[in-house]
Image: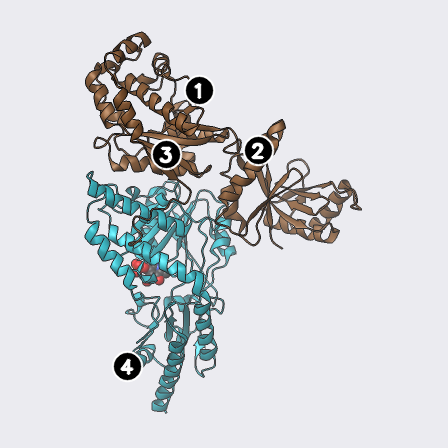
Amino acid sequence: MIYLDNSATTIPDPSVVESYQKASEKFFANPSSVHQLGGATEKLLQTAKQQAASFLQVDANEIIFTSGGTEGNNIAIKGIALEHQNRGKHIITTAVEHPSVDEACQSLETLGFEVTVLPVDEKGLVDVRDVKEAIREDTILVSIMHVNNELGTIQPIEKIGKLLSNYPKLYFHVDAVQSLGKVPLDIQKAQIDLCSFSGHKIHGLKGTGILFVRKQVSLFPLFHGGGQENGLRSGTENVAGGVSMVRALRLIKEKQQNQTNHLQAMHDYLWNELESIEGVQINSPHNGAPHILNLSVPGIKPEVIIHMLGEKEIYISTKSACSSKEKDESKVLAACGLPREITISGLRISLSYNNTQEEMERFVASLKEAIHQFKEVLR
Amino acid sequence: MQYDHILIRYGEMALKGKNIRSFIQALQENLQVKLKDFPNAKVKRTQGRMFVLLNGHEPEPIIEICKKVFGIHSLSLALKVENDVEQIKEAALEALKKADARTFKVAAKRVDKNFPHGSLEMNQIVGSHLLVNTEGYTVDVHEPDVEIKVEIREEATYITSENISGAGGLPVGTAGKSLLLLSGGIDSPVAGYLAMKRGVQLEAIHFHSPPYTSERARQKVLDLTKKLVGYGKSIKVHIVPFTKLQQEIFREMPDSYAMTIMRRMMFRIAEAVCEQENILSLTTGENLGQVASQTMESMHAINEVTNYPVIRPLIAMDKAEVVDISKEIDTYEISILPYEDCCTIFVPKSPKTRPRRDKINALEARHDFGPSIEEAIAGIETIHITAKSEDTEFEDLL
Ligand SMILES: Cc1ncc(COP(=O)(O)O)c(C=O)c1O
C-alpha cells in the first residue's frame, strides 16, 4: 500500500495507540476525584499539558484538550463571537478555510453577525493589505488558516499577526491543523490568540486535539457543566486521548527536527515529475507546505484516477476528504479563480514523513500509466 | 543583516561600589545558565557592557528569558557592524524598518575618538540616509516613536532601537540565602519572588501533614517552587513531616492558642533548617492585619522563638497588590487550587487574635514537644527543583 492521503488522516503510530491503551487502563480515574487515584490521573493530565505547552511554546494552562480540529475551530469562533458580541459583530475570514471555520462563521450570520470573506490569489494566498482593509470598528475576530488543506498554501500568519496587534480589540484565530509538525509556526511571534490542532493529522488518534487559548482571552463555552478545561469544555476529561495526543506531538516534532529535508525532497521530486507529464496542471504554489501537492488533469474525472490508482493500492484524494461527497467543484480551487475544468478535476497528494522516495517513484509511474490508459480508451 | 546580539543594561547595580564586580559576574552566570537551551548563545562582557551574542538563535525567545532575570534594568536588540560609515548607515536603516514607528531620532555617540566623524555629524549622516531611503517617516527629536542609537566604540559600532524593560532588582544569589516558608497560598510565593528580586537565593520549607494533606497539596508547592525557579536558580524544598507534631499541639494545647503555637513550632523547625543549611534568614508571606493570626500581637508572639531576621516583603501591601503580582508571576492559578494545607485542616473555633508571650510560654512549658520536633526535623525530605525538573514519571505514556 502507498498511502498518500495524509491530509485527510494519517495512520496512527503504534506507540500512540499503545500510550492510549495504557493510559486508559491505568489512569481511568476521574481527575476531579479527590482520592489518590484521581490525584494521580490529574497529575498525568497536567504533565501532558505541560509537555504539549513546551512543544508549542505556550503555557500549560493555555492548552485545552479537544476532540480535534473541528471542535477547536468551533469553540474558538463561536466562543469569541458569543462572548464579545457587545463589542461588535463583525468577523473576518478567508475564502479557502476548512468547512469547520467556514460553516461556523456562516452559522453566526444567522445570529446577526456579519462575516467578511477575504479573497485569495490564484495560489490561494491572502493579501495582508486585504486583511487590513477589511478591519472595522466592530471587528472582533479574524480567523485565518495557516496551511490550506487542499493546496498547501502557507498564509502569512506572522505578518497578519503583526498587523492585528495594532488592533487590541480583536482576536486572532488560526487553524493550524495542517501545518502542525510540517510548517513552523511561532504562536508568540505571530501573536495568535487562539490556535486549533488535530491529533489524527499527525499520526495520533481520531477524537483528539488541542486548542490553544491565550491566557487573557475569555470565551463563551459551547459545553457547560463541571467546569473542566478552565471552564471552556465541560465534561470528564479524555485523559488517555490527551496523553496520546501529546505522544503524537512529541513524535511529529522530532520528525520535523530531523526529517524536514526528506519531506521536501519527496515534494520536489513529485513537483518536477508531475510538471513534466502532459495534461497535468499543478495547482499548488511552489513554495507551499512540503506535504501537500494539488494537481488537475483536465478532462479526466478525478474519481476515475483515484479508482485506477486504488486498484494498485495507491491512495490519494480529490478536494478535501470532508467535502469529497459534495458534487463537482472544489470551493478552494474556485476561490483561486481557476477555470471550471480545473476546479472539478483537482487531485490532492499529501505526504507523511513515513513515505519513501521509492513510493514516490511508483506513484508517479502509476499515475502516468493511468493517464495514458485513459487517453488510449478515449481515442 | 540580522540582529546579532542583545545589549543588557544593569541600572541599579552600577551603583553598588566595591561589590560591583561580583554582582556583574553573578548576573552573567545567572543569565548564561538560563540560556542553556540555546547552545550558541553566549553572554559576554566588555567595558561596563553586557551582551548576549545570539550566534544564529532567534532573538525573541531569548529576550523573553532575559526579561525574567533580576539585575537587568533594560535590554535592547543590537546590530553590530564595523566602524564604517556605510555599514552603519545600512544597519540603522534596517533597525528603523524593523521598529514599528513613524517618527524617529538618531542618537549617535562616538566613544572611539579615532573615528573620523563626530557624534553630531553622525546624527546628520545617518538621519539623512534614513529619510532618503524610507517613505513616510519623519524626524522628531523630542518624542520620537523610536530612537536609533548608534554607539561607535573602539571594537565596533552598535546600533540599537527599542528599549525593552527588564525585571530590575539584583542578581539572584548576591544577597545571600533565605528560607521561605511556603504554604501553597497566594502570599508566600509572592514573598519569595520579591525576596529574589532583591538578590536573595531561596530555599523553601513546607509543612506536610499526611493524610490530612494530600499528595496534590505537596505537588502544588513543588509547582509553585518551579515558577519561582523561573526567576532564579534551582531551589531546594524541604518537606517537613508535620502530622505528629501538629496532632500533639492540637491535643495538648488549648484550642485558642494552638494556631500561634503551631506557627512557633514552624519557626523553630525552620531555624533548625537554616542552621543546617547555612541560611541567615527566614522569609514569610505575613502581612499585617490580613487575617486574625497576623496581628501585631501574633507576630510578636511567633517571632519570640527565633532571633534570625524574618523578611516579610508583603508586610505593608494590600491584598489586591499581592494578587496582582501573583498573577504576573503566574503563581495565582496554582495558589488558588483548593487543596487543604496544614494551616487549614485544624481551624480552631476562636483563635486568639491577641496572644501573649507569657501565656504561651507557660502553656508550652506544660508539655515536652522536644522529641516530636526532633522527629520532624529528622524526617525532612529535600527536593531539588530545577528549571528542567521534568516529570519522568509518565515517560512511557507521553
Ligand atoms: C485545515 C483543517 N482544519 C480543520 C480540520 C478538521 O479537523 P478534525 O478532523 O480533527 O475535526 C481539517 C481536517 O480535515 C483541516 O484540514
Task: Report in which chain the residue with disc 2 lies.
Answer: B
Q: For the residue marked with disc 2, what is the amino acid? A: Phe
Measured in 3D between alpha carbons, the distance from the residue under mark 3 to the one under mark 2, in whole angstroms, is 25 Å
Q: Could you say which chain is coloured brown in the image?
A: B
Q: For the residue marked with disc 3, what is the amino acid? A: Val
Marks 4 & 3, CB-CB < 8 Å contact: no
Q: Residue B237 carries which label?
A: 3
Of callouts 2 and 1, which one flags the residue occurring earlier in the amino acid sequence? 2
Residue bearing mark 1: B309
Q: In this view, does B237 lie to the left or right of B51?
A: left
Marks 1 & 3, CB-CB < 8 Å contact: no
Q: Is residue A352 left or right of residue B131?
A: left
**Where is residue B348, by image quadrant?**
top left
Residue bearing mark 2: B23
Measured in 3D between alpha carbons, the distance from the residue under mark 2 to the one under mark 4, in whole angstroms, is 73 Å
Q: Nearer the viewer, residue B348 or B329?
A: B348
